[in-house]
């Protein structure tokens, strides 16, 4: 499975629909300060199910919605779509019946977030599990935030272990065990 396209609409500074094609060999995004590089990575985390507003550098989740500019009014919703190439058919069970998967998350003011996979309504948890089982997700160690390296060096062993578990792709199993124990 590979990421192939990220589309942002009304998400932070990306007010008009903007496509980022993710092709083999893409190793970095460069641009002047404030042009939206971090916003792109945040969009990727967000569509994979990030639910902490602080990880989006906001006070509340609705802060990801385009807040308006001198020439443009604010928007009422933000949407991010992530297209995955599943031609190798390695998507987790339940999501593995097509060559391409489109995950969409939309947040509407006063109505919260809704998720879809290939146009079908799903829960946040389904999307989080899909990515956890594929050894990635909003907390994947492959996505390194500004300032995260120094945090990692100073992390306590327990926090560091969680990062290794994410990398090993077993965090989805822990989540399921936790839910089974609650039942
Ligand atoms: P740096 O090189 O400094 O790290 P960057 O390219 O990572 O910069 P970002 O942090 O992604 O830049 O983008 C910051 C810009 O996004 C700011 O101009 C900020 O005003 C804008 N922005 C953030 N949230 C919103 C929002 N909800 N609505 C409109 N614009 C927003
Ligand atoms: Mg940045």
Image (cartoon, helix red, strand yellow):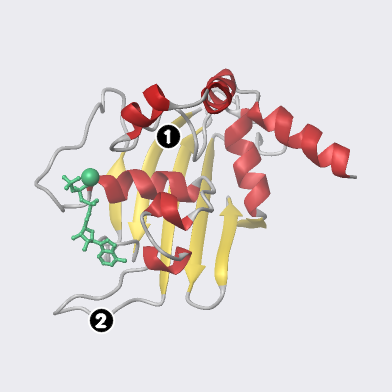
Question: Which residue is the site of mark 2?
Answer: 73
Q: Position of residue 55 (x, y in %)?
A: 42, 49
Q: Nearer the viewer, mark 1 or mark 2?
A: 2
The 10 Å Cα crowd at callout 2, few under 14, some 14 to 19, many 20 or more, is: few
Q: Position of residue 145 (x, y in %)?
A: 33, 37
Quadrant where ligand 2 appears: top left
Marks 1 and 2, how far apart at CA: 32 Å
Q: Position of residue 138 (x, y in %)?
A: 49, 40
Q: Which residue lies at the image location 58% right of the left edge and 25% below the top edge?
A: 158
Q: Say which residue appears at 26% left-offset and 28% top-offset.
A: 26
Who's the residue at 58% across and 18% down the image?
168
Residue 117: x percent and y percent?
A: 59, 50
Please, is residue 162 above or below residue 58 in the view? above
Whether residue 21 sits left or right of residue 58 in the image: it is left
Q: Is residue 98 visible?
A: no
Horizontally, is 106 left or right of 10 in the view? Answer: right
Locate the C terminus and report the quarter of the image it occupies: top right
- Left or right: 6 with respect to 123? left
Residues 154 and 139: in front is: 154
Task: Find disc 1 in the rendering and name its residue.
Answer: 3
């Amino acid at each position: 499975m590979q990421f192939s396209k990220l589309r942002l609409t009304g998400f932070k500074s990306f007010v008009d629909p903007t496509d980022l094609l993710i092709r083999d060999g893409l190793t970095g995004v460069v641009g002047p300060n404030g042009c939206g590089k971090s916003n792109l990575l945040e969009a990727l985390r967000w569509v994979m199910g990030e639910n902490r507003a602080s990880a989006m550098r906001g006070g509340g989740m609705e802060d990801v919605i385009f807040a308006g500019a001198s020439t443009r009014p604010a928007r009422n919703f933000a949407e991010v779509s992530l297209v995955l190439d599943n031609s190798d058919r390695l998507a987790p069970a339940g999501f593995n019946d097509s060559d391409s998967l489109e995950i969409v998350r939309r947040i509407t003011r006063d109505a919260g977030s809704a998720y879809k996979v290939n146009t079908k309504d799903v829960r946040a948890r389904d999307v989080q599990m899909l990515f956890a089982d594929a050894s990635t997700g909003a907390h994947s160690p492959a996505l390194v935030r500004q300032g995260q390296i120094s945090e990692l060096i100073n992390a306590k062993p327990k926090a560091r272990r969680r990062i290794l578990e994410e990398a090993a792709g077993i965090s989805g199993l822990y989540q399921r065990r936790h839910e089974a124990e609650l039942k």
